[in-house]
Amino acid sequence: MSTTDTWGATGGSAHEVALEVLLHGPLSRAELARRLGLSQASLSRLTKPLLTSGLLIESPTRADPATGRPAQPLDVVQSSHHFVGVKLTGEVAAAVLVDLRGTVRRTAQAPVTDPAPDRVVAVLADLVASVTVGVRPTGIGIGLGGHAPDHRTVAVAPFLDWSGVPLADLLERTTGVPTTVENDVVALTAAEHWFGEGRGRRSLAVVTIGAGVGYGLVQHDQLVVHRDVGIGLVGHYPLSAHGAVCVEGHRGCATAMLTIPSLIGQASVALGRPVTYDELLDLARAGDRACARLVDDAARALGRLLAAVGNLTMPDRIVVTGEGVALAEMARAAVDAGIAGDRDPRASALDVVTRPGDFRQWARGAGVVAIQEFVLRTR
Ligand SMILES: [Zn+2]
């Protein structure tokens, strides 16, 4: 039996053992038994077939941190499986090749010039081919701003003007590789939960700022999903009585206060010429009064949003990311002031971290969704 079959065929407690090692390994047998509440004898019985099949391996001997005695911790072979993750937008498709623990091995990017599904599928198939030269991928994950409730058919993707596009079927027909489609913020949250800032935490919130505003939540070690995932519900959360107006007519909502299109639009009006996002941030740093005001107001609004996330969903940690994340990093003091204004002074400090939010990270998120589809699928 190859390890390709083993993840799917491994049921019950053995699957839990394998998953624990994937997510937290290498782990000694003593530590693994403690984490899963198993006796050493049960653990030995469960791990034996996993070792025989090659799904788990014994790492080189070292001192067990728990007992000090020499032990051979159990691990997975990270390079035993590879997955392709793709972030798809209306303008560009970015692909990564990741291993079993979501480590990025290769990257590629291509423009999307025609949103017709067959043209997009051709672009995706080329990207998959270019990052998998010499490697047979186990699965493909596609992340996009939209909604695919069955993880195969895109019900709605506004940036591509798609509805009811059977993306997984179309791509599988070309590549022959099992494909999963997921909302991009859900995918990014999944990646942070398993292999990022949320690793080992039972609750986590992810807030993204960029073309839109996104929000993902993990509670009790489970990703929170809902039929409205993909609509971008947090995008219209009210943050300022005096902000710009969004397309839905909300003054000062998250979209109006925090998205790149809204901020560069406001900066361009203030300066009387087109301004890019990087330029806006540079000008604010250099003391341009209009840009500094825009950045400060946006950062305070972000702080208010983070305070709301903390107050209402009480996550252990909040990860701020997305292609607009540089704003949160350069204006951290204003973000913190926004948080403080809406928190009870007795409340514990919010654990807020920022992460790079480029296409590579989004694509990695889609790759982790493909990993999860593979290791959690039981057949
Ligand atoms: Zn709005």
Image (spheres, rainbow, N blue to C red):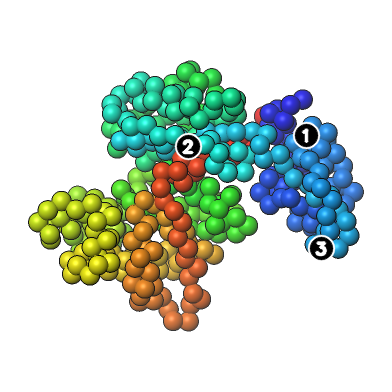
Residue 116 lies, with reference to residue 281, above or below; the image says: above
**Residue 339 on image: x %, y %:** 38, 72
Instruction: Give the secondary structure at mark 1.
Output: loop
Residue 95, image quadrant: top left
**Residue 167 on image: x %, y %:** 42, 26
Q: Which is nearer the N-term, disc 3 or disc 1?
A: 1
Left or right: 288, with 83 as reference point? left
Looking at the picture, which amino acid does disc 1 mark?
Gly
**Residue 335 on image: x %, y %:** 36, 69
Q: Nearer the viewer, residue 94 or 286?
A: 286
Q: Which is nearer the N-term, disc 2 or disc 1?
A: 1
Q: Circle 2: is it few (<14), some (14-19), or many (20+) Cα within 10 Å?
A: many
Location of mark 1 (residue): 54
Q: CA distance from mark 3 to mark 1?
A: 26 Å
Location of mark 2 (residue): 107
Looking at the picture, which amino acid does disc 3 mark?
Ala
